[in-house]
């Protein structure tokens, strides 16, 4: 899989992000959807990557800089035709390596608490993420789970 820093202009990328938002809306009330829109993903404090296999978009993910030592994983999504093929794991490895290069002490994330999010929860825990209280601007929410990983 080829992973590139992406500018979000490719139609396949925009379609995958729309699917991501649509899927979040199926499982979470509007006030509990924390996925970034295109403008949020294009912000200066966010780096966005896509993974490509044989010219096909396989998945995406982003890292948002919360402060000089803390990053947040955002917009992890695998294209439906590449599910269960290790795409998310490869993207997550790349993002965590970048976080380490940028000297982050901690990478945190918010994900859904419903059964549909169990594969994501399992992946994050496999990579050493541990449950944590809400961070940054998040608040306790029955539809959200919070995880953090020490990069030290």
Image: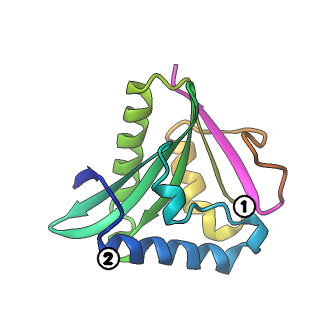
* Residue that badge 2 annotates: 11
Viewed as shown, does residue 56 lie left or right of 29? left
| Separation of residues labelled 2 and 1 (CA atoms) | 30 Å
Residue 111 point in image, percent of width and height:
64, 56
Q: Nearer the viewer, residue 41 or 129?
A: 41
Front residue (pair 112, 18): 18
Mark 1 is surrounded, within 10 Å at the Cα level, by few (under 14), some (14 to 19) or many (20 or more) other residues, namely: some
Residue 11: x %, y % from top left: 32, 76
Taking the magenta stretch, the answer to whether it contains residue 147 is yes
Which quadrant does the N terminus fall into?
Answer: bottom left
Say whether disc 2 or disc 1 marks the residue closer to the N-terminus: 2
Q: Nearer the viewer, residue 70 or 84?
A: 70
Q: What residue is pinned by disc 1?
A: 113
Horizontal relation, residue 33 to residue 139: left or right: left
| Quarter of the view holding residue 52 | bottom left
Q: Position of residue 14 (x, y in %)?
A: 40, 73
Which residues fall within the magenta stretch?
142-152
| Placement of 71 over or under 19, stated as above or below | above
Task: Give yes or no for residue 81 being in the magenta stretch.
Answer: no
């Amino acid at each position: 899989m080829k992973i590139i820093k992406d500018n979000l202009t490719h139609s396949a990328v925009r379609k995958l992000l729309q699917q991501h938002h649509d899927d979040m809306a199926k499982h979470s009330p509007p006030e509990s959807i924390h996925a970034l829109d295109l403008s949020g993903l294009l912000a200066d404090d966010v780096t966005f990557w896509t993974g490509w296999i044989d010219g096909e978009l396989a998945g995406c993910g982003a890292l948002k800089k919360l402060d000089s030592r803390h990053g947040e994983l955002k917009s992890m999504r695998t294209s439906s035709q590449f599910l269960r093929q290790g795409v998310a794991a490869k993207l997550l490895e790349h993002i965590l390596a970048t976080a380490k290069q940028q000297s982050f002490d901690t990478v945190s994330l918010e994900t859904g608490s419903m059964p549909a999010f169990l594969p994501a929860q399992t992946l994050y825990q496999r990579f050493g993420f541990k449950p944590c209280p809400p961070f940054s601007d998040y608040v306790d929410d029955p539809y959200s789970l919070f995880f953090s990983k020490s990069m030290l």
